Amino acid sequence: MAREVTHEERGPARLDESDMGDDDMIYVCQCGLSGSKPFCDGSHNATTDEADDVRYKYDGDDPDGKRREIAAIEYESG
């Protein structure tokens, strides 16, 4: 599966001890759906039924929003 991800930030996030979870680990989002980017908030659970050979777009990068299949990644200019 593939997902179109829109990034709005232009710089890095600094991680420190306050970003650690209860298990002393820091989890960074890789699915692009987290509401607390760059950190994982468990939103990737919405992707468990995605097929490997399909590309998906989540409206508004919201895991609870509408998901649609797309033929190709569309790039927005601007």
Image (cartoon, rainbow, N blue to C red):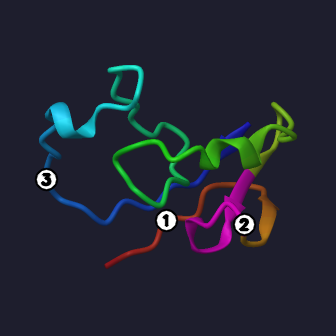
As drawn, 16 above or below 41: above
Q: Are marks 3 and 2 in contact (CB under 8 Å)?
A: no
Assess whether residue 57 is covered by the magenta stretch.
yes
Give amino acid for label 3: Gly
Give amino acid for label 1: Tyr
Q: Which residue is the extreme one toward the front?
A: 22
Which of the two labelled residues, at mark 3 and mark 2, occupies the earlier sequence position?
3
In the visual, does 78 lie left or right of 61?
left
Badge 2 crowding class, 10 Å Cα cut-off, few under 14, some 14 to 19, many 20 or more, is: few
Judged by depth in the image, the label closer to the viewer, 2 or 1, is: 2
Read off the residue under disc 1: 75
Is the C terminus in the top left, top right, bottom left or bottom right quadrant?
bottom left
Read off the residue under disc 2: 64
Badge 3 crowding class, 10 Å Cα cut-off, few under 14, some 14 to 19, many 20 or more, is: few
Judged by depth in the image, the label closer to the viewer, 3 or 2, is: 2
- The circle on residue 11 is 3
Alpha carbons under labels 3 and 2: distance apart: 27 Å
In the visual, does 59 lie left or right of 29?
right
In front of the other: 76 or 35: 35
As drawn, 11 above or below 74: above
